[in-house]
C-alpha cells in the first residue's frame, strides 16, 4: 500500500534582497510529509515560483492536509529535474597505435611528437606544459569508414557525407558468427528489416585482429547480399572483418554496389557481440576532409534503455 501524500495551504510574504516584496493568500504546494515545517514550506513556495534574490519568506496560516500531489515545481513529485537515466555505451572500434597493421601489405601509422612536454615548458615559462603530436597514416587505418569517393571519382567525399548517414542510426545486427560460413549472403539478410538502418555484420572476424589469421579466409558480404541491402534501403553497412569484400575478388562488388548507392561502409569493427539484434543507436563519423575517401572513425553504439 502506498504512503499517503500531503499538501500545504498557507499565506506567504516574501521580501527581496534588491527591494520590493510579494504576498500570496491560500497558496498550495505539495509537501513530502505531514510534519513539514513552515521554513520548509517557505522554501517549497520559493522553488514553485522560481523566485530569485529572495531575502526572507514568512509563512502564516499553515494548514497541512492529505491530498494527492499535483506536481508542484521543485516539490517531492516534480521529476522534471531528475537526472536522466545514464545511457550504456559500447565501443566498436580498435585503438590506433604506432606502427600497428590494419590491412596486411599496407603501412601502419607513424605517431611521433611534434612538441614534447619538456620542450614546451620554455614556451610557457614553466607555468604550463603541453604535448603536440603528429600522426602520419593512411586513411585505411584502424576502424575506418569508406565514403563513395573511395570507389568513385564523382562520389561524395568525407566532407560531403550527411550526418544522417553517420550518426545516431537505428541499428540491426546480422549475426553469422560461429556459422562456419565466410559469405554473408541474402539468406542471412532476408528476414531482417534494414530500411533506413545501420546494418552491422557480426561475423566474428575480429577475433584475429592484429595477427596474420585476421586476413586469412576472412568473412565478407557477397555481391548479391550487397545488392539486396542497397535495394532495401540500408543507410550504412559495417563488418567486423578485414574487408567487406572477398579480398580475392579484384572487382570488389560489395564496395562497388554499396558506395554507388551512397551507402557508407565501415570496416574493422569489433565488439558486435555486445549489441542486441535491434534497438542500439550506431555512430561512426569521420572528420570532414575534402577530397578524401576513407578515414578512421570512433565507432560506438548506445544501447536501448531496456538493456
Image (cartoon, helix red, strand yellow):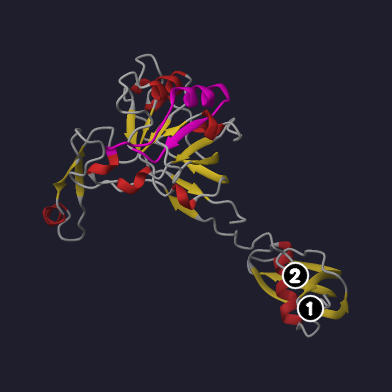
Q: Nearer the viewer, residue 46 or 14?
A: 46
Q: Nearer the viewer, residue 264 or 207?
A: 207
Task: Of the two numbered discs 2 and 1 on the same chain, state the one appearing first in sequence.
Answer: 2
- Residue stretch rendered in magenta on the structure: 215-241
Label 2 crowd bin: few (<14), some (14–19), many (20+), radius 10 Å: many
Q: Are marks 2 and 1 in contact (CB under 8 Å)?
A: yes
Does 32 appear above or below 133? below
Residue drawn at 44 percent across, 18 percent down: 260
The residue identified by callout 2 is: 45
Check residue 228 for magenta coloring.
yes
**What's the residue at 28%, 37% (across, down)?**
215
On the rendered structure, is 160 left or right of 118?
A: right
Q: What residue is at 41 percent from the left and 43 percent from the top?
A: 299
* Up-down relation of residue 20 to residue 267 (above or below): below
Q: Secondary structure at mark 1?
A: strand
- Marking on residue 282: none
- Find residue 134 and report its horizontal and vertical position in percent: 19, 42
Position of 146 with respect to 100 (left or right) is right
Separation of disc 2 and disc 1 at Cα? 9 Å
**Other-residue count near label 1 (Cα within 10 Å), few / some / many at <14 / 14–19 / ≥20:** many
Q: Is residue 182 left or right of residue 135?
A: right
User: Which image quadrant is residue 108 in?
Assistant: top left
Magenta stretch: residue 299 in it?
A: no
Q: Residue 7 falls in which quadrant of the image?
A: bottom right
Q: Residue at x 80, y 70 (%)?
A: 29
* Residue denoted by label 1: 59
Outermost residue toward the bottom? Answer: 35
Which secondary structure lies at badge 2? helix
Amino acid at each position: 500500500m502506498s504512503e499517503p501524500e500531503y499538501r500545504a495551504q498557507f499565506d506567504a510574504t516574501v521580501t527581496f534582497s534588491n527591494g520590493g516584496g510579494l504576498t500570496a493568500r491560500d497558496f498550495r504546494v505539495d509537501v513530502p510529509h505531514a510534519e513539514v515545517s513552515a521554513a520548509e514550506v517557505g522554501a517549497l513556495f520559493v522553488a514553485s515560483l522560481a523566485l530569485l534574490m529572495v531575502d526572507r519568506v514568512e509563512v502564516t496560516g499553515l494548514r497541512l492536509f492529505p491530498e494527492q500531489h499535483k506536481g508542484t515545481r521543485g516539490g517531492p513529485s516534480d521529476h522534471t529535474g531528475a537526472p536522466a537515466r545514464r545511457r550504456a555505451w559500447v565501443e566498436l572500434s580498435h585503438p590506433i597505435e604506432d606502427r600497428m597493421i590494419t590491412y596486411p601489405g599496407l603501412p601502419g601509422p607513424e605517431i611521433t611528437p611534434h612538441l614534447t612536454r619538456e620542450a614546451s615548458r620554455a614556451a610557457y615559462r614553466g607555468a604550463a606544459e603541453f604535448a603536440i603530436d603528429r600522426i602520419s597514416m593512411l586513411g585505411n587505418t584502424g576502424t575506418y569508414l569508406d565514403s563513395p569517393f573511395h570507389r568513385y571519382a564523382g562520389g561524395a567525399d568525407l566532407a560531403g557525407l550527411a550526418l544522417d548517414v553517420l550518426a545516431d542510426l537505428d541499428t540491426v545486427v546480422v549475426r553469422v558468427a560461429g556459422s562456419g560460413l565466410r559469405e554473408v549472403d541474402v539468406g542471412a539478410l532476408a528476414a531482417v528489416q534494414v530500411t533506413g538502418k545501420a546494418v552491422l555484420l557480426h561475423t566474428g572476424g575480429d577475433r584475429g585482429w592484429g595477427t596474420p589469421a585476421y586476413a586469412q579466409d576472412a568473412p565478407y558480404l557477397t555481391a548479391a547480399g550487397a545488392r539486396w541491402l542497397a535495394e532495401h534501403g540500408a543507410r550504412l553497412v559495417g563488418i567486423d572483418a578485414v574487408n567487406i569484400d572477398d579480398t580475392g575478388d579484384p572487382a570488389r562488388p560489395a564496395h562497388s554496389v554499396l558506395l554507388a548507392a551512397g551507402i557508407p561502409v565501415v570496416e574493422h569493427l569489433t565488439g558486435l557481440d555486445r549489441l542486441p539484434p535491434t534497438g542500439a543507436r550506431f555512430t561512426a563519423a569521420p572528420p570532414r576532409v575534402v577530397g578524401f575517401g576513407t578515414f578512421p572513425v570512433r565507432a560506438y553504439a548506445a544501447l536501448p534503455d531496456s538493456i
